[in-house]
């Protein structure tokens, strides 16, 4: 029986169990060795937190050794999900629908789903993912993405890291973790009489997604506010990127363009001193303009980037496609660059509308519409 209140100076025997799982992918593990490790842990003094971890480890070991006998070595490799559970316990789940975590409420399941609540947790999860060589996807607010009906292979990491620190003075700033909802941050700035992010009050998604894709609205964008961003790379660990190193262009960055691979951890943003009333009035103005021009309902945000010198919504409307439906997916009757989920919509129906819009606009106007929304997951065509 595990002791609820051990002496703090005593050392427990969790390492044997951890080593069993970490090395199971490389060599067979004898069941007798596993049972010996479990016995050591079960008889050791542990804290309440350690008891939870020990019980989680035992469940994983029992799963891996199920159906084996004492004479037969265990040859089943440790699954990535089990190694993640070894470190992050109940934060790791399997076969979780991603639809509730996207603004469009569309998408199939993630093979493995992990929610992190701090930049440190995100770094810890990524360390395991990289060690296990598992495919991964980082999800923030779930806007500007279309998740396949077939789901996402590997690990989906939901970033809910939301720490925020304001610095006042003649040149005020705000530092925030990547999981902060950008519109909420803009409103917090307003309440403190800090200007500069009014445009972001109508932008869906998280700071991480905005920094990654150079989000913008009403003449503002991230490139105008960013001082630096801390990013995580597999090769070099945490690196600090200046706004110049981000190589921002219209709705893209060095990371979104695919030239480099990194995960946004946090950002330092430039602000200005103002009155709370002045900033709030500007946010209200932008919000009213947004409501008048863009449709309500579940959508991914702007579907296509605006072509140089034109607007994707205008081209789609001129092509006669507003109001076109496939299944429960519709090109909005209010704004042609918004595709609406009218309920139980399949990602493939939205994808069919995307192809229809691109093909029709290309044929009629010789303009190639480039997606602003990212396609996530398994989009392979079955033959």
Image (cartoon, rainbow, N blue to C red):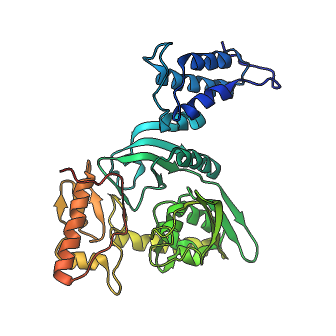
Residue 4: name its quadrant. Answer: top right
Can you tell which quarter of the image residue 240 is in? bottom right
**Residue 311 image position (x, y, % from top left):** 32, 80
Residue in front for this viewpoint, 247 or 326: 247
Is residue 132 visible in this depiction of the protein?
yes
The quarter of the picture where the N terminus appears is top right
Q: Along the horizontal axis of the image, is 245 left or right of 367?
A: right
Image coords of residue 299 (percent x, y): 34, 60
Q: Is residue 322 visible?
A: no
Q: Is residue 116 above or below residue 193?
A: above
Instruction: Give x and y (percent) for residue 278.
Output: 60, 76
Q: Residue placed at 66% from the left, 70% from the top? A: 193
Relative depth, front residue between 249 and 216? 249
**Residue in the picture at 34% in, 61% down:** 296
Q: Is residue 300 above or below residue 242?
A: above
What is the tally of numbered marks visible in this picture?
Answer: 0
Place of residue 47 in the rendered image (x, y in percent of width and height, measured from the top left): 72, 24
**Which residue is depicted at the point 58% across and 37% down?**
88
Q: Residue furthest right?
A: 9
């Amino acid at each position: 029986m595990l002791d609820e209140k051990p002496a703090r100076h005593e050392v427990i025997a969790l390492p044997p169990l951890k080593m069993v799982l970490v090395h199971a992918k490389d060599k067979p593990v004898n069941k007798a060795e596993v049972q010996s490790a479990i016995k050591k842990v079960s008889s050791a003094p542990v804290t309440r937190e350690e008891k939870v971890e020990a019980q989680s480890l035992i469940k994983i070991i029992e799963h891996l050794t199920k159906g084996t006998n004492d004479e037969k070595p265990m040859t089943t490799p440790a699954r990535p999900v089990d190694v993640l559970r070894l470190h992050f316990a109940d934060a790791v789940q399997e076969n979780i629908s991603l639809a509730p975590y996207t603004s469009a409420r569309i998408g199939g399941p993630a093979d493995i789903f992990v929610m992190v609540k701090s930049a440190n947790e995100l770094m810890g999860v990524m360390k395991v993912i990289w060690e296990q060589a598992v495919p991964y996807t980082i999800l923030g607010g779930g806007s500007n993405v279309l998740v396949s009906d077939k789901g996402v292979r590997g690990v989906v990491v939901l970033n809910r890291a939301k720490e925020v620190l304001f610095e006042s003075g003649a040149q005020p700033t705000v530092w925030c973790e990547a999981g902060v909802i950008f519109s909420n941050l803009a409103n917090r700035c307003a309440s403190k009489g800090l200007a500069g992010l009014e445009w972001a009050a109508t932008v869906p998604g998280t700071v991480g997604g905005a920094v990654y894709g150079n989000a913008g609205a009403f003449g503002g964008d991230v490139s105008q506010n960013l001082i630096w961003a801390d990013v995580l790379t597999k090769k070099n660990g945490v690196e600090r990127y200046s706004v110049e190193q981000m190589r921002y262009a219209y709705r893209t960055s060095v990371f979104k363009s695919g030239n480099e691979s990194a995960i946004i951890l946090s950002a330092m943003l430039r602000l200005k001193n103002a009155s709370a009333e002045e900033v709030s009035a500007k946010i209200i103005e932008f919000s009213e303009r947004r409501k008048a021009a863009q449709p309500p309902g579940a959508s991914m945000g702007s579907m296509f980037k605006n072509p140089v010198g034109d607007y994707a919504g205008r081209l789609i409307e001129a092509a006669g496609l507003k109001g076109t439906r496939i299944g429960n997916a519709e090109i909005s009757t209010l704004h042609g660059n918004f595709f609406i989920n009218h309920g139980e919509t399949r990602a493939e129906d939205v994808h069919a509308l995307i192809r229809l819009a691109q093909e029709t606009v290309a044929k009629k106007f010789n303009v190639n519409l480039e997606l602003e929304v990212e396609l996530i997951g398994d989009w392979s065509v079955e033959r």
